[in-house]
Image (tube, grey):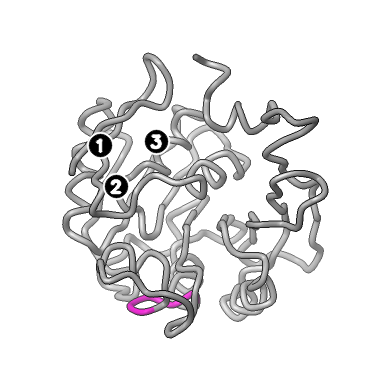
Amino acid sequence: MERMDQLWPGGYRFYFDDTLFQPSTDSFLLGAFPKLRRGDRVCDLGAGTGLLGLLLLAREPSLHVTNVERQAASHALSVRNAALNGLDRQVTCLHGDLRDKAQLPTAGSFDLVVSNPPYFPAGCGLVSPQASRRDARSEVTCTLGDVCAAAARLLRYGGRFAVVFRPDRLVDLTDTLRQSRLEPKRLRFVQHTAADAPSLLLLEARKGGRPGLTVEPPLLHYTDGAESAEWQRMYFRDKE
């Protein structure tokens, strides 16, 4: 079933569909993570319905965002979401497969690439019978290596690649990034509380960067029994 939501009262609105990959904490985490600069050219690989681009534009309205999405239904909603918010000139929606160089934008044309790649290797864990959710969560049609290779191709030298991923696959992630000449530079773990083990991680790599990783303080969902101020800002609750 198709639905509509809004980031905050008076903020960007967006369509989503229960049968597709739905809005999740992952998108909001990644939307709040990259350091944005005025006029940055951003590409979202596996953009789904385009929510991540809206989250980034909510932080920095001068961005130019290109969404790349393989699934036709999700791509169609990303086009509608851009039009719904009057962002036709700032958001470009491409229906294409990130594994095919011919379907990607011009190489070296982006300052920042973002992606919420599949978390699980093919054959691991439960696989959803729905193609949209299966492809979003498992490396069935697209691998982590495919995503990193596409990001490296699209970034200018010195450009940044930001991802949200699982902590238990951190070694896989850093190894795959380096194979694509993307050097891990910023790492931040996401935890329910300070006493809990990380449940997710956020990592930013730089194309052609020198070795040297900064591990930032963890992002906590709850502090002193209440939702943290940073978590509330991430969901724009400070604007309500």
Foreground residue among 79 and 118: 118
Left or right, 214 with respect to 59, comes to: right
Residue closest to the far bottom: 123
Mark 2–mark 3 distance (CA, rounded to whole Å):
10 Å
Instruction: Kindly identify the amino acid type of the residue bearing the numbered disc 1.
Output: Tyr
Q: Are marks 2 and 1 in contact (CB under 8 Å)?
A: yes
For the residue labelled by badge 2, is the local secondary structure a helix, a strand or a loop? loop
Mark 1–mark 3 distance (CA, rounded to whole Å):
12 Å
Q: Which residue is mark 1?
A: 15
Q: Tag 3 or tag 2, which sits nearer the N-term?
A: 2
Q: Which residue is mark 2?
A: 49
Q: Which residue is mark 3?
A: 54
Q: Position of residue 149 (x, y in %)?
A: 47, 74
198 versus 236 height, above or below:
below
> What crowding class fits label 3: few (fewer than 14 Cα within 10 Å), some (14-19), or many (20 or more)?
many
Q: Which residues are magenta?
A: 140-144
Residue at the (71%, 57%) spot, across then down: 198
Q: Are marks 1 and 3 in contact (CB under 8 Å)?
A: no
For the residue labelled by badge 3, is the local secondary structure a helix, a strand or a loop? helix
The N terminus: image quadrant: top left
For the residue labelled by badge 1, is the local secondary structure a helix, a strand or a loop? strand
Tell me which corner region of the image, top left, top right, bottom left or bottom right, holds residue 133. bottom left
| Residue 143: in magenta span | yes
Instruction: Kindly identify the amino acid type of the residue bearing the numbered disc 3.
Output: Leu
Residue at the (32%, 53%) spot, across then down: 48
Instruction: Kindly identify the amino acid type of the residue bearing the numbered disc 2.
Output: Thr
| Tally of marks | 3
